[in-house]
Image (cartoon, helix red, strand yellow):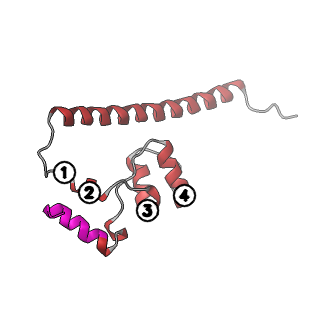
Amino acid sequence: MSAGPSIADLLEQTQRELAGTDARVYRRVADHLQRSSTALQDLQDPKPAGTQDPKALLGKGSFLQQPAASLKQLCKEHGIKGYSKLPKAALAQLLERHGVTPPPPPLESLTKKELIALVRQLLGEG
């Protein structure tokens, strides 16, 4: 007759699950505080016109526009575990659940017309 897991094993498992949940919550709070701090700093010290971050010109990205290797690197950088064998769609969902902001689309994904418009914008011609 099998007794099943002991109370100590169940408590330890529950404690591990709670610790993982707490870590994710703390990371999200830290990310939110960092973004808020940056936004407040930008309000206090606005950048002069024309000094926009060039990456911002690329627009909002999508995890699905990134190669799987880049998504795995993002997981590593953000301390996310259990991503190594996940397919690209699952990696994207995992990053979104952890509150990671997608990077801008890769330059390789832009059309010639989009690249020309981007260069004109950088040069102040458009």
- Along the viewing direction, whichever of 94 and 43 lies nearer the viewer: 43
- Along the viewing direction, whichever of 4 and 19 lies nearer the viewer: 19
Q: Which mark is residue 66?
A: none
In whole angstroms, how far apart are the C-alphas of marks 3 and 2? 16 Å
Left or right of 41 in this view: 35: right
Give the label, 4 or 1, closer to the camera.
1
Query: Among all residues in the image, which is located at the extreme bottom?
Result: 112
Measured from the top left, where is residue 121 in percent x and y? 20, 62
Q: Quadrant of residue 125?
A: bottom left
Q: Secondary structure at mark 1?
A: loop
Mark sitting earlier along the chain (1/2) = 1
Say how many tags the image has: 4
Q: Which mark is residue 52?
A: 1
Give the label, 3 or 2, closer to the camera.
2
Amino acid type of the residue tagged 1 in the rendering: Gln
Give the label, 3 or 1, closer to the camera.
1
Residue of label 2: 57
Whether label 1 touches label 2, CB < 8 Å? yes
Q: Which mark is residue 89?
A: 4
In whole angstroms, how far apart are the C-alphas of marks 4 and 1? 31 Å
In whole angstroms, how far apart are the C-alphas of marks 3 and 1? 23 Å
Measured from the top left, where is residue 83 in percent x and y? 51, 52
Q: Residues within 10 Å of mark 4 (few under 14, many from 20)?
A: few
